[in-house]
Image (cartoon, rainbow, N blue to C red):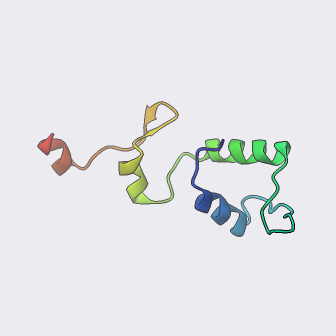
């Protein structure tokens, strides 16, 4: 739903950017509809990628280009 990797979501929870939710008896997180929407809103509000390589791997975010290839790569094209 949020369009982010699960490890990114877990990092955001660990860093306190998102609230941690209750877990079931197996340790799985249980996200309510409201919390899931908060996560989606937070993810869509992030304008930058957390890793420099993500700009190359995922050059488009919500329909616009957010990264360009280095000049050496553009010359090869």
Side of 59 where 22 appears, left or right: right
Q: Nearer the viewer, residue 26 or 45?
A: 26
Question: Closer to the camera, 65 or 23?
Answer: 23
Left or right position of 25 against 64 = right
Compared with 7, 40 (above or below) is above
Residue 8 in the image: state x and y as whole percent: 60, 59
Which residue lies at the image location 69% right of the left edge and 47% below the top edge?
A: 42
Would residue 18 appear left or right of 66 to someone viewing this image? right
Considering every residue shown, the one lying at the far top of the view is 63
Report x, y in % for residue 39: 72, 48
Toward the front, the furthest residue is 26
Image vertical order of residue 34 relative to residue 16, above or below: above
**Residue found 59% across the figure and 47% down from its top:** 46
Quadrant containing the N terminus is top right
Query: Residue 50: percent from the left, percent from the top?
Result: 51, 58
Quarter occupied by residue 52: bottom left
For the C terminus, give its image quadrant: top left
Residue displayed at 64% across by 47% down? 43
Estimate the x, y position of residue 62 in percent, counting from the top left. Answer: 52, 34
Residue located 69% across and 43% down the image: 40
Q: How many marks?
A: 0
Q: In the image, is 70 to the left or to the right of 4?
A: left
């Amino acid at each position: 739903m949020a369009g982010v990797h699960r490890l990114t979501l877990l990092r955001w929870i660990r860093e306190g950017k998102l609230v941690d939710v209750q877990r079931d008896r197996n340790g799985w997180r249980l996200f309510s509809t409201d919390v899931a929407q908060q996560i989606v809103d937070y993810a869509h509000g992030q304008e930058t990628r957390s890793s420099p390589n993500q700009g190359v791997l995922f050059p488009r975010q919500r329909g616009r280009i957010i990264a360009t290839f280095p000049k050496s790569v553009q010359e090869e094209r």
